[in-house]
Image (spheres, rainbow, N blue to C red):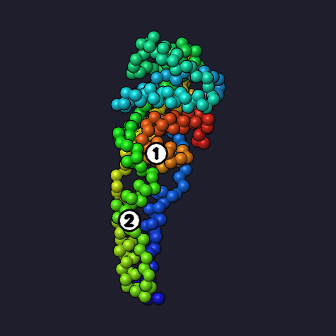
Amino acid sequence: MRPVLIEAGRRLVVLVTAWAFLSSTDCATVRPYRVTDFFRSPKLAAAGVTRVAVLPFENLTKEGSAPGIAAEEFSLQLGKTGLFNLVERSRVEELWREQDLDTLSRFDAGTAARIGKMLGAEAVILGSVTRFVPHPEVKVDTVRPYDDHYHHHHREEAGYPAIIVVGNEREHDACAAALTVLAAITVVGAVLLLLRPKPPAAQVGISVRLVGVETGDVLWQAKDNFRGDQKSVQALVETKEDRLRMVYDIEYLTQMLCRELAGTLLQQRSDQ
């Protein structure tokens, strides 16, 4: 075999490797995200908590709607676990107004316990919204980061080559030159894809804890952050429509995060 063919073969390996690298970002199986930053106290089972009140969430973001959306979604997802009977939100809001608790800055464990007792709850959920970044106002059809056509079109813009077929196997030098150019373009395209800024996506962060009314003990606590285009987060849903929705719909992303946070009440960390 002529040296030129050996060299051409090596360059072809480079091409195939680059192709596999680029394809892996779309085709590789990604495991669904799992919340690991949580604590569940052994006292939870002994406390015999059956009735829980989800109190208004603290807002640590600039979005005024964030705490209401997060508290509503978390209350819904907590109820779906079937672990507790929940105090109606309308009752919580009514008492909140009666006690003039329009701010959480002065809200401590003692106040939480007092409010919990007034609501007839054995424990209360205290929550904070730590991040709440909606997707910028764009049309859904114009930004489709998980659409096959989008990937194909932008890969070509980034320099991804078309398929080249060399028909005359006698023209070894021409084949080698073509493969060299092809490999070079592929590498450049891969670099451009890696350096290309991420498109915008919704982001949300929530921290929650379950506090016993009688003792003030933290019986459970969990927190996490979701970004709508995060691969493992997107693996939590099955359809392309839901994955796209995660990218631009902050309320849907909040729902998914609350579902995963509440779900940690049903499991036990292996390191506890």
Above-or-below relation of 216 to 272: above
268 or 178: which is nearer to us?
A: 178
Tell me how far mark 2 sits from mark 1, CA to CA. Answer: 25 Å
Residue 160, disc: 2
Q: Quadrant of residue 266?
A: top right
The residue positioned 39% from the left and 81% from the top of the image is: 176
Badge 1 density bin: few <14, some 14–19, many ≥20, Cα 10 Å = many
Above-or-below relation of 30 to 115: below
The residue positioned 59% from the left and 40% from the top of the image is: 269
The earlier-in-sequence mark between 2 and 1 is 2
Image x and y of residue 58, in percent: 42, 26
Name the residue carrying label 1.
244
Q: Quadrant of the C terminus?
A: top right
Image x and y of residue 118, in percent: 54, 12
The residue positioned 35% from the left and 64% from the top of the image is: 159
Image x and y of residue 244, in percent: 46, 45
**Dot 2: what SS?**
loop
Asked whether, in this view, residue 263 is left or right of residue 23, the answer is: right
Asked whether, in this view, residue 15 is left or right of residue 192, the answer is: right
Badge 2 density bin: few <14, some 14–19, many ≥20, Cα 10 Å = many
Above-or-below relation of 141 to 18: above
**Dot 1: what SS?**
helix
Q: Residue furthest top?
A: 98
Please name the amino acid that badge 1 sits on.
Answer: Leu
Residue 139 visible? The answer is: yes
The residue positioned 35% from the left and 71% from the top of the image is: 184
191 or 178: which is nearer to us?
A: 178
Please name the amino acid that badge 2 sits on.
Answer: Tyr
Residue 182, disc: none
Residue 49 visible? The answer is: no
Q: Quadrant of residue 166?
A: bottom left
